[in-house]
Amino acid sequence: MLYSICIVLILVASVILILAILVQNPKSGMAANFGAANQVMGVRESANILEKTTWTLAGIIVALSLVATISMEDGIATQSSSLEKDAATLMEKAASATEAMPQAEVPAETPAE
């Protein structure tokens, strides 16, 4: 249950993070020349709020990812065991197929005259 809640919160935080990044003004590049009007109009404080929001959301996503990993049920982590069994079966078949192949005889080396 906690795992599902964490995944939903990670998705919500990710969407908000994407929006916060898209709203920010670029600090360099061709579009930076168009951002000079924001400084004249007094929108300097919003850049600080957006930057703090970006870092906070990134930290929340990292923390929620760790909590989701810790709270992951055993069934979710062991679903790959069937894949491991299939891989082991394939490896055994490949090993038995190489043993059944006839081996060519290597001629003995003759001493040089």
Image: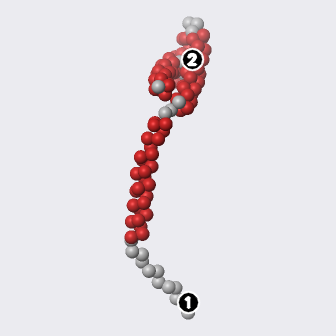
Is residue 25 visible in the rendered image? The answer is no
- Identify the residue at the far bottom of this view: 113
- Identify the residue at the far top of this view: 41
Task: Identify residue for label 1.
Answer: 112
Task: Identify residue for label 2.
Answer: 53
Q: In the image, what residue type sits under mark 2?
A: Thr
**In the depicted view, which residue is nearer to us: 106 or 97?**
97
- Identify the residue at the far front of this view: 74
Please state which of the two labelled residues, at mark 2 or mark 1, is closer to the viewer. Answer: 2
**In the depicted view, which residue is nearer to us: 38 or 59?**
59
Residue at the location (44% across, 43% down)?
Answer: 80
Residue at the location (58% across, 24% down)?
Answer: 59
Coordinates of residue 97 in the picture (x, y in percent): 39, 65
Placement of 93 over or under 69, stated as above or below: below
Coordinates of residue 74 in the picture (x, y in percent): 49, 36
**In the depicted view, which residue is nearer to us: 78 or 35?**
78
**Which picture quadrant has residue 91?**
bottom left
The secondary element bearing badge 2 is classed as helix
Coordinates of residue 41 in the picture (x, y in percent): 56, 6
Is residue 89 visible in the rendered image? The answer is yes
Q: In the image, what residue type sits under mark 1?
A: Ala
**Which picture quadrant has residue 113?**
bottom right
Q: Residues within 10 Å of mark 2 (few under 14, many from 20)?
A: some
Q: Residues within 10 Å of mark 1 (few under 14, many from 20)?
A: few
Left or right side of 56 for 106? left
Query: Which of the two discs, 2 and 1, labels the residue nearer the N terminus?
Result: 2
The secondary element bearing badge 1 is classed as loop
**In the depicted view, which residue is nearer to us: 52 or 25?**
52
Residue at the location (45% across, 37% down)?
Answer: 75
In whole angstroms, how far apart are the C-alphas of marks 2 and 1?
Answer: 80 Å
Residue at the location (51% across, 18% down)?
Answer: 20
